[in-house]
Image (cartoon, helix red, strand yellow):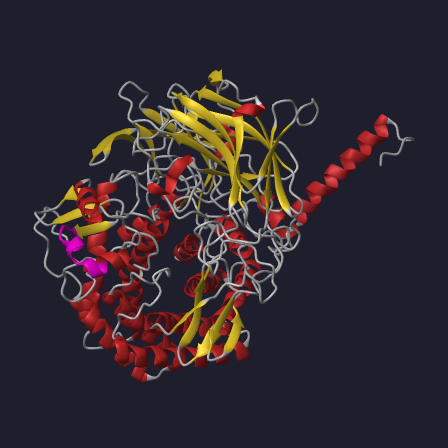
């Protein structure tokens, strides 16, 4: 409370002293990262034991509200209660007097928990919620094509509301098609701040809106966290349509007019540094680099017009500028936000992504996010029950996959080993988070090679065992899982030597799991993937063999036992039978890619989860671990061929650096077994759509096509795919001492933080122009990353609408793990 005896001069003095103390405190805080504001936030969080605060200054939503409105329109009757109706299990009300909730405000109330699941949900609750409620406003088929944005205000009043969201739906019944099946009914999830008015918008310029029959605001019942109340309450008003200047681009390769496409984090000191503009024949040919601190011109370059297979662009190349610092690109009245040029530019992103991983912990209370959770999700084995909580939740829902926790543990340890000597605080925090995941890996082993492997959870459960929300975790003894876990456990044993007891246990466990995998493989062959929900389901035989070889190499490095060395060689023999040795009959003479097996009929692809880096990991582990082996020349040639393939296909996405999805054969769809393994919920028209999607790519010869984005149907988003390819080329580039390959790896990082056609960073809080993502249960998190940029219909061009929905915009732990794994190479 202010002291009434103080005069204005005294208050000014004490204010100046206070500011000086804060400034000095920030300056004296040990430096963990280059961003002073982030540095202070990390310390204030107890070094990531509380979530980092959201800074929305450079978010798409904040920047978007500054756009010039050219016209506005309020749908007729939108403020009349009689025109609204309730749908689902909740209730709607209408404010009848002025006040905080003025006349025309709709109130929606939704129960958090009910006695039954939503209609159509399975009895066991797998991927089930309690059903939702909506406030619906019916329209008579209005044409909204002259407007490109819908704006509205929402006031959530949710008891115990930590992670609040509401969905906007709009319904179009015209000639225009819905963009994809996951965007049914125009659903957009909005992440909100509780007990304050949130002004929100959705740009709809690319969406069907020729005959709008209604809009709705709704939310499912997702259960109760430890502090949640019995209902969710939302007040909604201020709904209007707008036409705004300079709307976002959501489809295609061409940048928005007047926007510089660049890596908003920055650029490595070494390698190429380029930015991209929409081609403008009449524009100024020059661009400048400005020093951010004083706007001094430090570099002047000339734009270069380039024509590639995806269009015509202006490229700004400043690769020969190699001075550390913060800079701004300026040209023709347009500028970027400040970005870095340096040698350790990814460190800020590592802290942020680590924050996301921490926030996704399962079974552990995360301050300001959720309490300890899901102790009533259980796995049963030989009459015993295991509480299946720990590790990290899978995504924007709360589902769990043990193998995904293993993937993330490995990436955390890779990064920890990189920074061990240069950043002690980051090293220790990475090791702590990895130890949390390792505990779950060990916990979920049930004996005899069996594991608790996954659970489909999309609710907060009550923690009480014996009632309706007790879901079952899946259990199986997949040899692939055990081979991969054996590799991760061996790597962890070599990395976690500061805890000798844990390291010893991990060594023993790695050996046991390898033996379990080997025995099961000899019994069933490679093809033992009993759960199609799990991200390993589409694994090919050649990837299986590469994984087994890599695991054996890790154990050979750990133990020195030459039996593992021989296993590594034997499994790789089978992998090399699946590698393309003869050039295709196209102008590039492509070879070096891998087929699913030795028959060389179906090429290896990824369309959601991806572990394509495993070929490079396994080959390099062999080449380095057994350098004197008689087959070393064969491994070396396989690496050279694979690297050549990945290099040659890059021209098909130039001047962007995104790695293309790769080569496909026209007859792959005829192999129904592998096709169904790779494409879940493909639909009745899948065979026709497969061919249609291929023909949107580049025809290489009479049988083979090159796709920039994968062939996919239900699960769309390519971040894990191109980051896995980035990991592969980084491994190859380092081993082969090939700068071209290393540059391809860098470009996967640049694409992710803004050097994409939409000019958006896909890491929340990192760089500039980052958007909200689909994270309905964990809520918005600094460092969250989505499944990735998708395509529309059967097209082969990038599609990235603002609308938040699964899977493309859903936050995903896999992407975070891939990011840490790739950045650990630089």
Q: Is residue 340 left or right of residue 468?
A: left
Q: Is residue 345 left or right of residue 250?
A: right
Q: Is residue 295 visible?
A: no
Vertical placement of residue 390 versus 749, above or below? below
670 within the magenta span: yes
Q: Quadrant of the C terminus?
A: bottom left
74 within the magenta span: no
**x, y percent for residue 224:** 61, 52
Frontmost residue, 536 versus 561: 536
**x, y percent for residue 605:** 25, 55
Q: Is residue 560 left or right of residue 409?
A: left
Frontmost residue, 483 versus 418: 483
Q: Is residue 750 left or right of residue 51?
A: left
Q: Is residue 38 visible?
A: yes
Q: Which contiguous range is marked in magenta?
A: 665-674
Vertical placement of residue 634 versus 722, above or below? below
Image point 54% across, 80% down: which residue?
A: 501
Frontmost residue, 9 versus 377: 377
Main secondary-structure element of the magenta-colored stretch: helix
Frontmost residue, 638 versus 432: 432
Residue 485 appears in which quarter of the rendering? bottom left
Vertical placement of residue 32 versus 463, above or below? above
């Amino acid at each position: 409370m202010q002291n009434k005896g103080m005069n204005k001069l005294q208050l000014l003095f004490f204010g100046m002293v206070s500011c000086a103390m804060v400034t000095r405190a920030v300056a004296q805080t040990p430096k963990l990262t280059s961003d002073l504001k982030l540095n202070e936030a990390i310390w204030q969080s107890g070094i990531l034991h509380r979530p980092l605060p959201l800074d929305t200054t450079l978010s798409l939503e904040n920047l978007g509200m500054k756009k010039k409105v050219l016209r506005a329109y309020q749908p007729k009757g939108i403020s009349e209660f009689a025109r609204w109706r309730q749908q689902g299990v909740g209730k709607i009300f209408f404010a009848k007097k002025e006040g905080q909730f003025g006349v025309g405000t709709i109130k929606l109330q939704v129960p958090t928990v009910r006695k039954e699941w939503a209609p159509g949900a399975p009895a066991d609750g797998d991927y089930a919620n309690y059903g939702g409620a909506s406030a619906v406003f019916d329209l008579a088929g209005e044409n909204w094509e002259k407007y490109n944005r819908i704006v509205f205000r929402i006031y959530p009043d949710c008891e115990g509301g930590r992670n609040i969201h509401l969905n906007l739906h709009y319904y179009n019944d015209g000639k225009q098609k819905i963009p994809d099946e996951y965007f049914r009914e125009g659903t957009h999830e909005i992440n909100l701040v509780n007990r304050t008015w949130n002004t929100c918008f959705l740009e709809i310029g690319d969406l069907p809106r020729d005959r709008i029959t209604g809009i709705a605001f709704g939310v499912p019942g997702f259960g109760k966290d430890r502090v949640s109340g019995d209902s969710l309450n939302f007040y909604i008003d201020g709904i209007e349509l707008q036409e705004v200047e300079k709307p976002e681009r959501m489809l295609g390769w061409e940048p928005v007019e007047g926007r510089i496409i660049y890596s908003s984090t920055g650029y490595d000191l070494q390698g190429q540094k380029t930015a991209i503009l929409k081609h403008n024949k009449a524009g100024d040919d020059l661009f400048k680099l400005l020093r951010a601190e004083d706007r001094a011109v430090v570099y002047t370059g000339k734009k270069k017009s380039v024509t590639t297979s995806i269009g015509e662009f202006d490229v700004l190349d400043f690769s020969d500028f190699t001075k550390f610092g913060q800079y701004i690109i300026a040209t023709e009245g347009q500028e970027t936000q400040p970005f870095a040029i340096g040698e350790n530019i990814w460190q800020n992103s590592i802290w942020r992504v680590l924050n996301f991983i921490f926030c996704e912990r399962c079974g552990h209370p995360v301050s300001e996010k959720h309490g300890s959770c899901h102790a009533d999700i259980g796995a049963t084995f030989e009459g015993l029950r295991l509480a299946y909580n720990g590790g990290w939740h899978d995504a924007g829902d709360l589902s769990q996959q043990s193998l995904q926790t293993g993937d993330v543990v490995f990436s955390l340890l890779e990064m920890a080993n990189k920074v061990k000597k240069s950043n002690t605080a980051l090293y220790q925090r990475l090791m702590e988070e990895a130890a949390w995941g390792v505990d779950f890996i060990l916990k979920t082993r049930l004996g005899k090679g069996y594991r608790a492997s996954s659970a489909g959870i999309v609710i907060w459960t009550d923690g009480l065992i014996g009632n309706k929300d007790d879901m079952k975790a899946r259990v199986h003894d997949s040899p692939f899982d055990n081979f991969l876990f054996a590799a991760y456990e061996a790597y962890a044993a070599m990395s976690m030597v500061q805890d000798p007891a844990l390291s010893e246990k991990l060594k023993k466990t790695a050996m046991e799991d390898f033996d379990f995998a080997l025995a099961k493989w000899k019994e069933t062959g490679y093809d033992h993937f009993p759960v199609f929900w799990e991200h390993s389901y589409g694994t090919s035989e050649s990837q299986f063999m590469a994984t087994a070889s890599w695991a054996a190499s890790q154990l050979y490095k750990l133990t020195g036992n030459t039996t593992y060395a021989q296993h590594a060689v034997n499994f790789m023999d089978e992998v090399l039978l699946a590698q393309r040795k003869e050039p295709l009959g196209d102008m590039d003479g492509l070879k070096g890619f891998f087929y699913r097996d030795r028959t060389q009929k179906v090429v290896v692809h990824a369309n959601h989860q991806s572990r394509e880096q495993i070929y490079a990991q396994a080959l390099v582990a062999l080449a380095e671990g057994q350098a004197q082996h008689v087959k070393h020349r064969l491994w070396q040639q396989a690496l050279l061929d694979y690297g050549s393939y990945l290099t040659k296909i890059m021209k098909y996405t130039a001047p962007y650096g995104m790695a293309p999805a790769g080569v496909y054969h026209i007859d792959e769809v005829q192999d129904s077994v592998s096709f169904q393994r790779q494409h879940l919920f493909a639909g009745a028209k899948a065979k026709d759509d497969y061919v249609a999607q291929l023909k949107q790519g580049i025809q290489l010869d009479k049988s083979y096509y090159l796709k920039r984005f994968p062939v996919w149907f239900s699960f769309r988003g390519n971040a894990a795919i191109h980051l896995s390819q980035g990991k592969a080329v980084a491994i190859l580039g380092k081993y082969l001492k090939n700068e071209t390959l290393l540059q391809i790896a860098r470009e996967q990082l640049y694409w992710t933080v803004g050097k994409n056609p939409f000019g958006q960073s896909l890491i929340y809080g990192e760089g500039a122009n980052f958007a909200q993502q689909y994270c309905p249960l964990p809520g918005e998190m600094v460092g969250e990353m989505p499944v990735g940029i998708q395509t529309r219909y059967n097209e082969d061009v990038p599609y990235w609408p603002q609308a938040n929905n699964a899977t493309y915009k859903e936050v995903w732990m896999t992407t975070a793990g891939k990011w840490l794994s790739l950045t650990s190479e630089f």
